[in-house]
Every structure is written in C-alpha cells, then in structure tokens.
C-alpha cells in the first residue's frame, strides 16, 4: 500500500470540486485499511474515507488528513432456505454493478435502487433510498474497521440506527467506523414496489412486471430526470426532503394549497423540489458556474470550473429562500469535507 502526498481530489468526486489531500492511499483489503489507520496514528491526522465520491463536496485548499479510498472488492452469494439469498459485498464494489448482478440472478429487494452512483460501502452511510425503497430494509449487517478499537467488528441492522437518509455512520459516534463489507438479505421471489407515480405511470395496466423491466424502467426514468455525470458535476440531491410536524404542514397547506406531503408517522415529508420550483422559483436557476438542475431543482450542478465557495453560496441562498418563505430549515444531504 502506497501513501501519496498532496493529491488532487476533485477528479475523485462526482461534483468535480475540491483541493488536495495531505496524504492519500487506496485500500483493496481489510488489512490495508488497518495499515492506513496505523499510519495516521504516527502522523496524528484524521482519516477521511472516500468511496465513489458521489455524495461529497470537498473544500478548496489542502485537507490535513489521510484520504482513504476504499477499493475492497468481492461478492459472495449464499442461499438460505428456499426463499432467501444472502450476499456479502466488499465496500468498494460499485453499487449499481451489484444491483445489476442481483437483478440478473433474479433476487428481489434493491431493484428500485438502480442507477444510484457510488460504492456499496457508501449505501448504508446515508441509507440510500429511491422510489419507495430504502437500503436498510435489505441490510443484515455492516462490517466496519473500528478506528477507536483498532479492529474489525460487525454491526447488526439495529446497531446501524438507520432512519431517513441517515445512520450511525453520519453521527459523531459513528465517525470512527470505516465500512469494509455489507451483507444483504434478498428474496428469491418478490412483489414490485411501484407506489411512486413515475414507476406507476410507466407500468400503467401492468401490475407485476419482471425484475429486469423494473430495473430498466428506473434507469430510464432517472436518465430523463437527473443530470448526466459525464456532462456536469453533481452529487445528486443536495438537500434532504424536510420532515415537519403535521400541524406545521397543515398551516403551510393553507398558504400553498397544492403543497404535496407524504405522511411519516406523526410527521409529513415534503418534496423540497416542489418548494424550490413553486415557491422559490429556483428550478433551473444559475449563479455563475453553479445552478439548480432544470429537470429536478433539488439537484445542484457544477457546470464546469465551480468552487466549493460558489456551491456553498448558492446552497445558502436556497436555504435562506426556503426559510423565509416557509419557515423550514433545510438540511444538506451532501457531506462536506473541510
Ligand atoms: P419524485 O418521484 O418526483 O418525488 C419527489 C419527492 O417526493 C421524492 O423526493 C420522494 O421522497 C417524495 N415522494 C414521491 N412519491 C412518494 C410516495 N409515493 N411516498 C412517499 N414519498 C414520495 O422524486 P425524484 O426526484 O424523481 O426522485 C425519484 C427517487 O429517486 C426518489 O425516491 C429520490 O429520493 C431518489 N433519488 C435520490 C437521490 C439521492 O441523491 N439520494 C438522487 C436522486 C433521486 P424520497 O426522496 O424520500 O423518495
């Protein structure tokens, strides 16, 4: 394992923004993860873990840390009984590559999560979700290298404390955990989840499409709506959809009668894109090299040459507008590395 110095990070992220890492290395095995951590003890710098770089925004200048790119590969299949397939996956495997393999093999559970960029190890961090499916519903356990304990350990699904686009890995107590492998439980037979309108409309009149058709539909719908990563820089949804108390939602609904809302227990999830489009008029808004994507305004894009500061300025303008018009404080989904 080779430790490099002063390595540019921007090409390692899908936003194509950011400065350099004081130290940088890739780990293809769990042993190399441990070696990298030992190196940081000597240098007294923190470890910053990088997967596919598709949900992060890196600051300008030099990050005084070891940036550790996880490239642990391997997919192991094991059949349990007649209806369950367990699959244990190296954290550095491409997420969409994994989804493609599971669909090819006829295993149900993550097909609605097709087309999400990034690595498998990053999937539990923000509990990736799309079209009514969250990855937490298929995760059995997550193996981590625990920096504080200096060893590998397994977290059960409950220990990961998954919630909407969140988990222990995003909280201070989970910051010293480096995901090395993830185990999933998939089904040999399943029922399509077509509750989201784009998928429902796509399959109108066809209630039980085959698995491959569902994956292809998700890829096609996403392809129409989300920017092409080979053309612009982006990290997908820049903000989380706000979840607000029902009473607050009812008050807002009086002001904005068409405001959509999806019940979540006693709270209501609001599609932020609707507010950005209909209340803040920010769909397609640009500011220098950055903008809110014309087809889906929750997605912030770098048209080329943008800086961390430009992104943060636009993000602040968006957050200020939402707060001023609705009283809602929006939260960033994209992780900032400073
Ligand atoms: P959409 O279908 O236009 O819906 C807009 C928002 O309303 C979504 O964000 C979704 O919340 C919510 N929603 C829609 N139908 C719902 C239902 N039946 N029940 C509960 N909530 C509902 O969304 P989109 O922008 O085209 O995105 C499609 C899916 O891909 C979404 O699930 C989105 O989260 C996911 N996606 C994720 C990322 C990412 O970076 N993580 C990027 C792009 C798209 P949810 O977001 O909670 O599903």
Image (cartoon, rainbow, N blue to C red):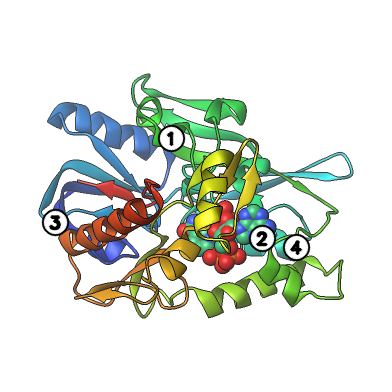
In the displayed structure, 166 sits above or below 168; it is below
Earlier-in-chain disc, 2 versus 1 = 2
Q: Which residue is mark 3?
A: 60
Q: Quadrant of ligand 1?
A: bottom right
Earlier-in-chain disc, 4 versus 2 = 2
Q: Which residue is mark 4?
A: 194
Q: Is residue 130 visible?
A: no
In the displayed structure, 165 sits above or below 103; it is above
Q: Name the outermost residue toward the front.
A: 254
In the displayed structure, 31 sits above or below 215; it is above
Q: Secondary structure at mark 1?
A: helix
Q: Is mark 2 within 8 Å of ligand 1?
A: no
Is the residue under label 2 in contact with that under label 3 (CB below 8 Å)? Answer: no
Q: Quadrant of the N terminus?
A: top left
Query: Where does residue 257 sit, x and y in percent of width and height?
Result: 57, 61
Q: CA distance from mark 3 to mark 2?
A: 35 Å
Is the residue under label 3 in contact with that under label 4 (CB below 8 Å)? Answer: no
Q: Which residue is mark 2?
A: 112
Q: Nearer the viewer, residue 296 or 219?
A: 296
Is the residue under label 2 in contact with that under label 4 (CB below 8 Å)? Answer: no
Closer to the observer: label 4 or label 3?
4
Q: CA distance from mark 4 to mark 2?
A: 9 Å
Left or right? Give the position of 7 relative to 147: left
Q: Is residue 251 visible?
A: yes
Which residue is found at the position 41% from the left and 52% from the top? Answer: 326
Q: Is mark 4 within 8 Å of ligand 1?
A: no
Q: CA distance from mark 2 to mark 1?
A: 23 Å
Q: How many marks?
A: 4
Which residue is found at the position 83% from the left and 54% from the top? Answer: 190
Q: CA distance from mark 4 to mark 1?
A: 29 Å
Within the image, what quadrant is residue 264 found in? top right
Q: Which residue is mark 1?
A: 169
């Amino acid at each position: 394992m080779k430790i490099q110095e002063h390595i540019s990070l921007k090409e390692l992220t899908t936003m194509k923004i950011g400065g350099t890492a004081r130290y940088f290395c890739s780990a293809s095995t769990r042993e190399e993860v441990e070696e990298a951590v030992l190196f940081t003890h000597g240098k007294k710098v923190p470890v910053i873990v990088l997967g596919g770089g598709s949900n992060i925004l890196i600051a300008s200048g030099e990050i005084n840390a070891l940036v550790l790119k996880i490239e642990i590969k391997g997919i192991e299949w094991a059949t349990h009984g007649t209806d369950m397939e367990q699959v244990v996956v190296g954290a550095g495997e491409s997420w969409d590559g994994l989804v493609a393999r599971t669909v090819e093999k006829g295993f149900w559970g993550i097909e609605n999560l097709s087309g999400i960029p990034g690595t498998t190890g990053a999937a539990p961090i923000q509990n990736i979700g799309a079209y009514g499916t969250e990855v937490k519903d298929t995760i059995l356990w997550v193996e981590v290298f625990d920096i504080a304990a200096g060893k590998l350990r397994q977290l059960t699904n409950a220990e990961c404390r998954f919630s909407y686009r969140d988990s222990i890995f995003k909280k201070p107590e989970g910051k010293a955990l480096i995901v090395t492998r993830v185990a999933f439980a998939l089904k040999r037979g399943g029922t399509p989840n077509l509750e989201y309108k784009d998928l429902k409309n796509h399959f109108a009149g066809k209630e039980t499409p085959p698995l491959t058709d569902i994956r292809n539909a998700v890829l096609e719908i996403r392809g129409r709506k989300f920017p092409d990563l080979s053309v612009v820089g982006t990290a997908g949804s820049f903000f989380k959809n706000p979840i607000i108390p029902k009473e607050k939602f009812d008050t807002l609904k009086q002001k904005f009668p068409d405001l959509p809302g999806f019940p979540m227990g006693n709270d209501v999830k609001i599609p932020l894109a609707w507010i950005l489009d209909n209340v803040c008029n920010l769909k397609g808004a640009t500011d220098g090299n950055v903008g809110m994507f014309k087809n889906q305004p929750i997605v912030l894009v770098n048209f080329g040459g943008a800086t961390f500061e430009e992104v943060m300025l636009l993000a602040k303008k968006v957050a200020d507008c939402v707060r001023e018009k609705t009283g809602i404080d929006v939260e960033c989904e994209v992780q900032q590395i400073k």
